Image: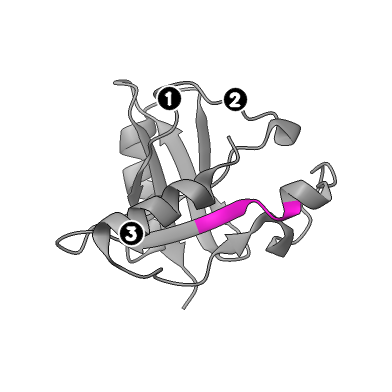
Amino acid sequence: MGNAEEAFNHYKKVFGTEWSAPIARMGDMPAQPGMPPLTEGDKRKVMHVALPTLGGTQIMGTDMLESMGHKLVEGNNVTISLNPDTKVEADRLYNELSNGEKDCVPPHDEFWGYWGTCKDKFGIRWMFNVSKQ
């Protein structure tokens, strides 16, 4: 709820690593249809941060914004992120993991690539990202 940068600066110190790419801010995001305008404070919040940890594993984060209707509940603050090579593979994984569940966004084109997310029948949240080439 607005402290992703503080948390990731702590993790950066713990693991002694550097960001995989510069931190992307909410204000860097192009306006989306139906999206409410962001306050100056929300524009400075973290849209995406990625930090290598151990053994090739990366942790990623984003700030949840009350202005966008986000509410932190223990359990919705962790998502397993998969990076399939193709849209076809992302769709296959999404279809098998979402299995008709309600809390899902089907994979679709976004400005950074092909993205979707779902919570499976076991309550595990999954995210699918196919980066633009």
Which element is circle 1 on?
Answer: loop
| Quarter of the figure with residue 24 | bottom right
Q: State the image coordinates of residue 32 (x, y, percent, origin top left).
A: 76, 52
Q: State the image coordinates of residue 52 (x, y, percent, origin top left).
A: 29, 63
Please tell me which of labels 2 and 3 falls first in the chain: 3
- Dot 3 corresponds to which residue? 13
| Quarter of the figure with residue 56 | bottom left
Residue 105 vertical placement versus 130 (above, below): above
Amino acid at the residue labelled 3 = Lys
CB atoms at circles 3 and 1 under 8 Å apart?
Answer: no
Amino acid at the residue labelled 2 = Lys
* Horizontal arrangement in the rendering, residue 96 relative to residue 114 (left or right): left
* Horizontal arrangement in the rendering, residue 80 relative to residue 64 (left or right): left
Amino acid at the residue labelled 1 = Gly
The Cα atoms of the two marked residues, 1 and 2, are separated by 23 Å
- Dot 2 corresponds to which residue? 71
Q: State the image coordinates of residue 38 (x, y, percent, origin top left).
A: 81, 47
The Cα atoms of the two marked residues, 3 and 1, are separated by 41 Å
- Dot 1 corresponds to which residue? 100
- In magenta, the rendered stretch is 43-48
Residue 78 vertical placement versus 109 (above, below): above
Bin the neighbour count of mark 3 within 10 Å (Cα to Cα): few under 14, some 14-19, many 20 and up: few
Q: Residue at x 66, y 37 (%)?
A: 65
Circle 2 or circle 3, nearest the eye = 3
